[in-house]
Image (cartoon, rainbow, N blue to C red):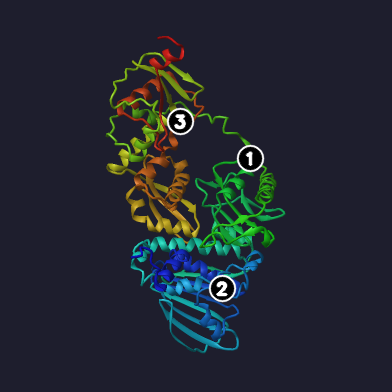
Amino acid sequence: MALIKKLPPSVVSKIAAGEVVAGPYSVVKELIENSIDAKSTSIEIEIISGGKSYIKVKDNGIGMSKEDLILSIEEHSTSKIENFEDIYNLHSYGFRGEALSSIAKVSRIVIISNNGEESNKLEAIGGKIKSIEPYPTNEKGTIIEVYDLFFNVPARRKFLKSPQTEKRLVTEFVEKFILANPETGFIFKSDNEVIYNVKPSTLIERFNLIFPEVKEFTEINGKFVHGIISSPNYYRKNRTGQIFYVQKRFVQDKMLYYIFESGYGEALNNHPYGVLFIDVPPRLVDVNVHPQKLEVKFSDPNLIYSDIIRSVREGVKKFVSKEIFISEKTPKQTNTLPNQNQKFIKESFQEYRTSEKFDNKVKQYSSLFDIAKKNIELKEDILILKKRYVLFEGEDGIYIMDFHAAHERVLYEDILKKLNETMETIDLIVPIQVKVGKSLKEIVKEKFEELESNGFKIDILENEIKILSIPSFIKLSDVEDIFREIIDELRIPSQNPKNLKHIIADKACKAAVKTGYDIKYEEAKGLIEEVLKRGLTTCPHGRPLFLKISFKELDSYFERT
């Protein structure tokens, strides 16, 4: 009996649909692309329950005839290309003829379309047409309604995220279209709440709308690239503020992130904002390399990359502020360790078990000493190297400690303990206002109760978050930065998401002394003793605190046996 079986068409179609339809956000993406290809100047998007139960996209495009309406949900039916060579001369978003077909196969779909000559309504369930009939409407264009996504693929439906998370993912994709199509008006509603209502405008106005926190930016124009970049003074701790388009199609490309930041040179500070449009002759780019068309290949990438670097460099020169050119090698002078930071030497802290991430990281370093098994006696002699490392002698060798990383870990433990005990908060006389875009606001809504239970009392307004109270261990001058970093951290999908307490503690470690701080002997000795007492081996991010060179290794090196 043959082990290989030919899959039935119903199974094949659902698997194929899964490659295109990853969730509500990808349905919205495909439908908006169809609307733009249909020459729409106004697009309305509406979702309910994050798009899990209902998605609607309405446009004022060219519409479809009854014949086209029937063909639109058939596999590989498209008006964009006629032969394979046309793929290399594309001027549209769509071309495969898979989107509507894939969406229809895993949902209940209703399409109403008016092409100016006739108006019809089609209903289909699981990809099979149930009815098609005349449906009089006065407005030219198309309305597509998608109900109960993955209703017939329960294994896929159970992997959809919470309505709030799905809503945020949809919002982020809508924002990408808003940025890429300033000549098009957009209305976006979620659960009857208007999220966006934007008229046709300019790229600058759209950039201000999506990234209200960025106050310094400039336009750039190269041979193949144009767009907007921020001053190096405005950045995020991740690359969520960097968006790239090729032929106005949003793409994700690790090399583009790297090339973009390379243009900042020594002015680079974390990850600056950038919205870049790469326009090249269609023959120089292949968009048919990803099921959801999120990746592309250039036939001559160096030509594109060099133009991006050159254009970004020219843009960065427009920011006159001298501060952005100060090298990190020039240390910021800080006061000697204040009393509040010396508490970790005197206070008793709750024992903290390192996470699995820490344990795995430690195993990679054979030269780390295992302080859980060895009783290390600190000798009197301590040597401070380059205002960065502390060298000291133990019973069985020489140890070098990263002072900043060690101080950061001790503060992390201190803060974590406070978060796990009765929370002390400070009510702000003057609330701190944090400008955020819609997608970041959705994260704050999603984590509202958790943030409040961890010391952040907030009000969520239209285009900003008002912080009313903060945990007592956070400096007033650091509040906005720490709050933004917490929200940015929550935004990035993770296989092993951190507990919010750990994220807050991690970000609040900004008080740790920086590399270049003039370390005093007493401070170094006190920190070593505290780290040894607690049995700490890594910083909060998993990097090692110590390097050990055993006396046996020294003897071997100098050939002393």
- Residue 67, image x and y in percent? 55, 85
In the foreground, 294 or 383: 294
Image coordinates for residue 263, horizontal then vertical, percent: 64, 44
Q: Residue at x 40, y 36 (%)?
A: 542
Residue at point 49%, 20% (across, down): 385
Inspect the image, locate mark 3, and give the three-letter code of the amino acid beneath it.
Answer: Val
Indicate the quadrant containing the N terminus: top left, top right, bottom left or bottom right.
bottom left
Of mark 2 and mark 3, the one earlier in the sequence is: 2
Q: Nearer the viewer, mark 1 or mark 3?
A: 1
Q: Measuring from the top left, give residue 15's x and y in whole percent.
A: 42, 66
Instruction: Tell me the residue that label 3 is attached to.
Output: 513
Query: At label 2, which amino acid type do we have?
Result: Ser
Q: Residue at x 42, y 34 (%)?
A: 543
Nearest to the observer: residue 509 or residue 458: 509
The residue labelled by disc 2 is: 35
Q: Which mark is residue 265?
A: 1
Q: Residue furthest front?
A: 1
